[in-house]
Amino acid sequence: MGNTEDILNNVRAQIDAHPEPLAEARRRLDLVRSTATGFKGALRTYSSGSLAQHTFIHPVGDGDGGLVLDRRVYPLLGPDGGGQTPRDITAQLCGLLGPAVREVYPRARCGTSKRGPKLTFGQPVDGQDPTVDLVVALTRRDGSGLWIPNLEQNRWEASHPELHVEMFTSGSPSLRRTRRRIVRLLKAWNKQYSEPGFSSHNLTVWAWEFVEPGMGLATGLQTVLSRAAARVAAGSATVDPAGVSPNVQLLVSRDIAARRLRTAAEGVAQALANDSDREAVQSALSKVYYSYITNPSPSGLSARIALLRQPTLVSTASLGLGGAAVTLPSARAYGEGHGSR
C-alpha cells in the first residue's frame, strides 16, 4: 500500500459511520417498513439511499426507504389515475406510522420531508438520533420506475430508487468495496464546504460511472474527481442511470462546481505523483481534506486552518487578525470525535 492510499485510509477511519448508530438506523427503518406493510393497498416496501448502498458516513443521519402502493386501490391517486396529489395520502400514512412506532420509541414523531413521512425518534445512540424518511410511491402505468411525491410542490415525479440500489451495489465484491469507500470519501470532501456542491446521489452516480474493476482507492478517487471535473467544465449533463428521472442537478454554479472538482483532482494527482514521499503526499492531500489532514509544512491560509484544528488555545495574532489580542478555542475538525451534525 502506498502513502496516498494509507493517508486516505486514515481519513476513512475518521469518517466511517460508527457501528452502533448505523445498526440503530437499520432497526428503525426495518420497524417503519414493517409497520407500513399494514397500510391499505401496500404492495411492498424497499430500502434505498446510503443505508442500502452502504455509503453512510459519520454522523449517521436518515435511513431512506419507500412504500409502494397498488394504484388499483387508489384509482384517483397520481398522474396515471385521477390526478390526486400526494399530500393527503402522506398524512394518512403518518397517522398509521406515528402511533405504531411510539409503542417502541415513546418519543417518536411523524412529520414530513420532501418525499413522504419523516420519523424522528428522540432516543439518541452514541450521540446520534437517526431519522427515517419513507417515500410514498406508486407504480407507473407507462414506463419503468415509480411515481414519488414532491410534497414541496404537491405533485408526483418519476424515479427508480429500487433500480438505483441494484445498480450502485452491482459488480464484483472488490469493485463494490472500492466504490463504496470512494463514495464515502467524496461525501466527506463535499461536506467540508459550508455550501456543498453536490448531492450524495450525484456523487454516487459518478462513482458508479467512473470507478472500474482493478482500480485502487486512490486511483479511483482521482479518476472520479478528474472525469467529473471535465464533464462539468464542458457543460455536459449527468443523466439518471436508470433513465427515469431528469438529469442530476448541481447544488452550486457550474463554474464553482468545476473548480472544486478540478482542485481536488489535482491534489490527489499530486499525492499519487509523489507517493513515495509521505510528507509530500500529506501536504497534497491536506489541500483536499483540510478538515481531516494537517499540512506538515503549512503556510498562509492552510496554516491558519491547521492552527484552528489544534487541541490548544490559538491567539488571534497567530491567525493574522487585527485588533486586541485575544485567545480563541480551537475548532474540532469535522469527523473527529463523536459529535452530531
Image (cartoon, grey):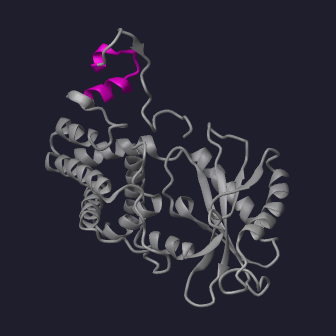
Residue 122 sits above or below residue 185 on the image: above
Point out residue 153 in the picture as x, y percentages from the top left corner.
Answer: 62, 66
Can residue 133 be seen here? The reply is: yes
- Residue at 45% from the left image edge and 81% from the top image edge: 243
Point out residue 2 in the picture as x, y percentages from the top left corner.
Answer: 22, 48
Residue range in magenta is 303-320
Please state if 297 lies on the left or on the right of 71 as rendered: left
- Residue at 51% from the left image edge and 53% from the top image edge: 56
* The quadrant where residue 279 appears: top left
Please state if 264 lies on the left or on the right of 67 as rendered: left
- Residue at 33% from the left image edge and 12% from the top image edge: 323
Residue 85 sits above or below residue 281 on the image: below
- Magenta stretch: residue 236 in it? no
Point out residue 272 in the picture as x, y percentages from the top left corner.
Answer: 19, 50
Point out residue 222 in the picture as x, y percentages from the top left corner.
Answer: 26, 57
Q: Which residue appears farthest toward the bottom when viewing the image?
A: 142
* The quadrant where residue 233 appears: bottom left
Can residue 298 be seen here? The reply is: no
- Residue at 61% from the left image edge and 45% from the top image edge: 20
Please state if 36 lies on the left or on the right of 299 as rendered: right
- Magenta stretch: residue 307 in it? yes
Can you say which quadrant of the picture contains the C terminus? top right
* The quadrant where residue 132 appears: bottom right
